[in-house]
Amino acid sequence: MPDLPSMAESAKMMGATMGDLFKSMGSLSLPMPAMAKLQGEFLQQSTALWNQTLQMPAADGKPAAAPAAPSDRRFAAKDWAANPATAYIAQMYLLNARTLMQMADNLEGDAKTKQRIRFAVQQWVDASSPSNYLALNPEAQRKAIETKGESLGQGIKHLLADVRQGHMSQTDESLFEVGRNVATTEGSIVFENELFQLIEYKPLTAKVYERPMLFVPPCINKFYILDLQPENSLIRYTIEQGHRVFVVSWRNADESIKTFTWDQYIEDAAIKAISLVHEITGQDKLNTLGFCVGGTILATALAVLAARGEKPAASVTLLTTFLDFTNTGILDLFIDEGMVQMREMTLGPKSPGGGSLLKGQELATTFSFLRPNDLVWNYVVGNYLKGDTPPPFDLLYWNSDGTNLPGPMYCWYLRNTYLENNLTKPGKVTVCGEKVDLGKIDAPAYIYASREDHIVPWDGAYLNNKVLSGSKTRFVLGASGHIAGVINPPAKGKRSHWIGAGSALPAEAKTWFDKATEHTGSWWPDWAEWLKATSGKHIAAPKAPGNRAHAVIEPAPGRYVKQKAA
């Protein structure tokens, strides 16, 4: 049952990736002493496990079950330990998995190839877990018996529904609707072009800071991660602090813009949005915020404007963003010259038709397989083997609402950031006709990273401090991952964050962390307090959105965010 038709394209993509990884094994070797040691340990442990299963009599004279590892939640249910056979299967799987990973760790060769092999082995190990298969999963079997087969029937219904929608459900998507119970903060669309809509939100205070705030979210996802529910909306929180907030809502790329470039995203979207906020508010300075890829786009736009002699930003906030791509974590495993050239030939300007779309589902699948047990196999077992309906979770609904990207834009980004790290080299790349130097961004910067982020490792984001050499920077580290660390409202009192000692930022991330102080709760209040210094005085809140030149087109969240990826 794990071989899902709804995952056919995903499996094809991952299969190609895994094939490339295994080809790398030709340059690696496993030293004989290490191999002999692993073989000896495996034989000893497997023999002990077999003897433990057969030779420990229970009170009724029947063999007792070997206890499954309680630390692995896949085998935590009592059903695994209740039967010696299933307990043995679980323990042998864990032993095999440990041994295979130890073999991968002991390979000799270059570091990147070793990491690729380790990733490939981990994917295979996770996929082969006995918990993923009905014939080997006693918990799913018990439920099937107790429900007289109803759980299996429900699992098939879930499978067929996911085949129709083209992706695996991670939450009950029928319970959410953009504009009805997510992305509900009141606002208006005051501009739109081929790339984005500009949202201006209704003030929630009688007076607002004179300098407006512009959010640039990632274009590989939809903006409403910043506006899920009223109680966990960073957008609403910022408005409640007295800011006049504008947000870029990216268009979900379709065939009409499949040839659009990185330059167009910078000039016709980020720079255009900055210009529009100036026009509508009459202010020459604005606070800016970029999240993930949106932060890279925002910084590039501000560098282009700096090259033109314009410095519109009163402040720059970067949330889990790379500017320096030296340390990109696990994503680095997928990227080399051959892979980028292949993308350029199939998606970029050199491809037939001058470009094609990178499908949002492909990106979503790649990110899911970075944490396969949590984001793939967990749902295979729950949705299909047990027939459970996943619980409602707004964040996972957003996660399933993917977006497409124009191939040429994506290829430029891939080569000049992840592969060649050109944005850190002053004057190396030309964007919108200007030599880019991120060090020319002369504005205070608030850099936030998440400690458990597997997409933007926090010590990689810390390198942004060096890139923004012309800015006074404040670095704050939050607990949890790429999304949960950012979306952490103060009212819930969850998680924590770290603030460095003094204003100086050491060269090394570890040095900063060793001297930093942990604070309970959200980082949002720290950011709100920091922002006051760059926001100007209070003025009367505007009575209506937009202006004469930019009248209201439609209510927020607008049409663009509701477009589904094909």
Image (cartoon, grey):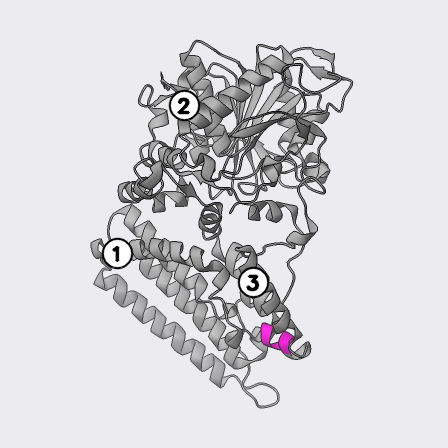
Q: Residue at x 58, y 14 (%)?
A: 278
**Relative to 6, residue 545 above or below:** above
Left or right of 368 in this view: 41: left
Residue farthest to the bottom, as pictured: 61
Q: Nearer the viewer, mark 3 or mark 1?
A: 1
Q: Is mark 3 on a helix, strand or loop?
A: helix
Q: Tag 3: residue type?
A: Arg
Within-10-Å neighbours for mark 2: few <14, some 14–19, many 20+? many
Q: What element carries label 2?
A: helix
The reply to whether the magenta stretch includes residue 420 is: no
Q: Tag 2: residue type?
A: Val
Q: In the rendered image, which residue does mark 3 sit on?
A: 73
Residue 469: percent from left, percent from top: 42, 18
Q: Tag 1: residue type?
A: Lys
The reply to whether the magenta stretch includes residue 142 is: yes
Q: In the rendered image, which residue does mark 1 sit on?
A: 23
Q: In the rendered image, which residue does mark 2 sit on?
A: 467
Per the picture, the main secondary structure of the magenta-coloured stretch is helix
Within-10-Å neighbours for mark 1: few <14, some 14–19, many 20+? few
Cα separation, mark 3 vs mark 1, equals 33 Å
Cα separation, mark 2 vs mark 1, equals 36 Å
**Relative to 87, residue 257 above or below:** above
Residue 52: percent from left, percent from top: 47, 80
Q: What stretch is highlighted in magenta?
A: 140-144
The count of marks equals 3
Please report whichever mark, 2 or 1, sits nearer to the chain's N-terminal start: 1
**Relative to 287, residue 389 above or below:** below
Q: Nearer the viewer, mark 2 or mark 1?
A: 1
Q: Do the residues labelled 3 and 2 touch (CB within 8 Å)?
A: no
Residue 465: percent from left, percent from top: 45, 24
